[in-house]
Image: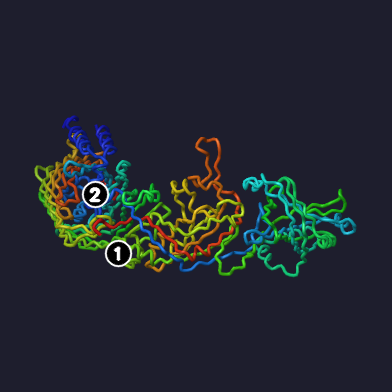
Amino acid sequence: MKKSVFLFFFALLPSLALVACLFDSSDSSLVSWLDDQGFPSNYKVETVSIDSIYPVSAAVGFDSTPRKQSYQGVLGNVSGMNHELVFDFCFRDVSFFSKFENTDSAAAFLALYLDSAFYDQAGIADSLPIGENLEINYTWILDKGVGDDYLDSVGDIKDSIWLRELRGWKNAPTVDTTYTVKVNNLDSAIRLDLPGSLVKALMTIEDGARLQLRMSAPHSKRLYRIYGPSSSPPPFMRMRVTDTDFKSVWPFRMGLVSTSEETCKDCLILHGGVLESLVVDIPGEKILNALENLYGDDFPYTEGDSMDVRQAVVLARLTMGRSNSMDGSELGLPVQVAIASFVDSNGAEVQKTESYKLNRELIKESGHPNLVFMEGDSLSLQMTYGMRSYINRAGAGAKLRVVLRMGRSMLAPYDTLYYDHLTSDGEDSVYMFMDYLTYSRYDFTEEMKSPMSLKLWLATKRGDDE
Amino acid sequence: MIRNSLFTVLVLIICSQAASLIGLEALGKSSDGLSAPFLGRGNAGHAKTGDGLSLWNPAILAFEEKVSFVADISYETVAASNGDVSYSTTSFDIPSLMLSFPLGRFGAIAVGVVQEYSSNLRVEVSDSSTSNLAKLEYQGSLFELTPTYALRLPFFRRISLGFTGHFVMGGNSRELTLGADNSAVAEDDAWATNNSELTDNVDGTWEIKNHPAYYTGSAEYKGRDVSYYLSYTTAYVLANDLEYNFEFSQLDTLVPTKITREIDVPATFATGVNYQFLKRHNVMFDFMFRGWDKNIPNLGGGWNLADSTETQTEFLAAIGYQRDGSSVIYDKFWEKITYRLGAWTRNWYISDVTEYGGALGVGIPLGRRGTQLDIAVQGGLRESENDSFWDEKFVGITLGLTGVGSWGVTPRNYR
């Protein structure tokens, strides 16, 4: 057989045949083939609205465990919460304390620097000076020791142990002192003279000491935000023999103790800036009934392993009432309400923060719907993950439960993006949220007693004839 | 010449791939694990010895004289059409890998990995003007690990018996990703599902229910000119453990629901004859029969798909011709090439689906020890009376490489 014949039969002919088979394919023919098989070429969205939903239960949980604050601390009483600062000092200086214990002019003060970056972003820097007669309550524990080993032993105390012990201060010396605080600019320190009884205690130091100094301002008109030990400039304490002979010490850690001042036990008040959450149980039966009416199938799904994958929740939105009062916003800005759901994670129930899909037309008109301290009467929160997990596992006894928390202040509530960005001309920046926590307060008591509504956007695997 | 031919074949491989669009929800396309020599003569020739192992007729292994390794790769292009509309697709398969060891008077053993069924498809439609967005991907391979033993009878050396165990493995999946059609929702509500794709996902694995394997037994008579075989393969139940889920992203899924679909595969009978004449010419005829009597539950179902696929009696009738290549060292290269052709008709296991095909093949020797490159080109039609299945034209090419070792061969027989 000649080469040309070989090539014809075993190369050219198959090539032509293959090329012949490759023509005339298009999207429309594929759609037609999908349709003939019974496949859709997209999923048809259906919506279901369920009104008059009243929570089965709602409860606020507050974690009052003191927290370490390295960069920023807050002091004061605002929005029903009192925030105290605790400084942990440890120092030694034999020669200085030999003079300090014998001087008649001994004195000490604490210097705090306001967090200028926060005040700039919050717009408060423009309204200086700020000032008030501030009553500060000092409590302290002074422990004396000798040598560098003593300092090392204090440094070895773990933060978690120290924070836990902050709850149990008893019989510690306490003194109330009133200062006139006036802040003219954000670069100067606020000087707070320490009470005489504390100075006297400090004069008894011979070598080294550890001072845990706790301060609160239970009647303050505002919350003071100061730089912490890891920021610059940090707070410090200065002990003075004369104007030229003094010793400055810096705290090596700082703690924040927040306590609730709320008196209404039946109220569902949520505070921002602290570890507090509102857990809401939503009645799932109404949702399952609505799905039953839509699809004509039984809900919950109990066949086989009872995991329901007959349909998919593309988005779920919970809408409740909203007060338009600004009381409790702290900074006069709208505050985001964050929502998380309890979802299944490989058999365990875990909290999952919900995603947030933007309804741009609505945002342009009335702002982001997940904000409080805004005009308008409704608060809308997306709970897609929770709803998916609930319907999926309803046959296995799952509950529909969400967690609400107060988030950060929003700086651009009508902006249709949800992250910092440049303006369309590229010449300016839009910052969506404050970089700092907002110590806000919102009372959900009425909202939890009022009817809520739920809207689901659904896709189903069911065929047209089912 | 050989180099040029190989290059041409490689170009074809790059240009083409294909699988059938029929039966993707059932088992897919049956490939029977046939190697290139069998495909080149239209699936016929299972009674012919000396061309490798047939899983329909393991008894021919007893007549193998050399240690050999056979690997095949296969490409196929399919053009499915319904009236004036047609759609083409391609796929790539590795139908078989086999290793056989003759053991002299103790018979011969072999082990293979073969593809029994394949269902591979990846298509995508994206048309913003009609809001169509669909990506469909099937990935399915039912592989078998096939240890084989064959022995020529002590006093009837023309007769051999062979046995193969078929240990099933492999997996299958279907991913259907869809975009949203908001035509049924209010305009104010369309924001919620814009750009929200979701994937209907089915994942599964294969095994045999309540048993590790199923088995084939066969007997071969090798006469001077005529060879016959008869084989029987046991019935078995395929268990396909499936997980159904919706995926919204790779990390955002639901707890899957788990279902096992069971497929009753009936027993298989096969027989065939090979007649050799004028020393190097062979004609052969084979017939395989499998009496399906139960429908096959579908893989994913849902949407508007049927829940099951109807079956029919499956058979394959194949006729083939082969001119063996010369083993005389002084003959021309063309004389040393083995030439094959064949034709077949097959009733698929799926109701109302019939296949007609023809094939050409060559076996090109590569060196003196018996190493060989086999090329098979198959083409044909699949016709269906079922509205769901489009008629198909197909062209495929399979390359098989047979490597021969000299282990256990005495110098006297070495050539």
Q: Answer with left or right where residue A53 lies relative to residue A408.
A: left
- Percent position (x, y) of residue A376? 49, 53
Q: Position of residue B183 (x, y in %)?
A: 31, 49
Q: Quadrant of the N terminus of chain B?
A: top left
Name which residue type carries label 2: Asp
Q: Quadrant of the C terminus of chain B?
A: top left
Q: Is residue A161 above or below residue B84?
A: below
Q: Which residue in the protein does label 1 denote?
A: A297
Left or right: A90 as drawn, with respect to B201: right
The amino acid pointed to by label 1 is Asp
Judging from the image, what secondary structure is the residue with disc 1 in? loop
Q: Position of residue B189 (x, y in %)?
A: 38, 51
Question: Which tag, 1 or 2, sits closer to the chain's start?
Answer: 2
User: What is the number of the mark on residue A435?
Assistant: none
Residue A241 visible in the picture:
yes
Q: Which mark is residue A35?
A: 2
Q: Using the rendered view, name the quadrant where residue B91 is placed.
A: top left
In this image, B415 relative to A117: left or right? left
- The front one of B194 and A23 is B194
Direction from residue B322 to residue A323 in the image, left or right: right
Query: Dot 2 surroundings within 10 Å: few (below 14), some, or many (20 or more)?
Result: some
Name the chain letter of the residue that bears numbered label 1.
A
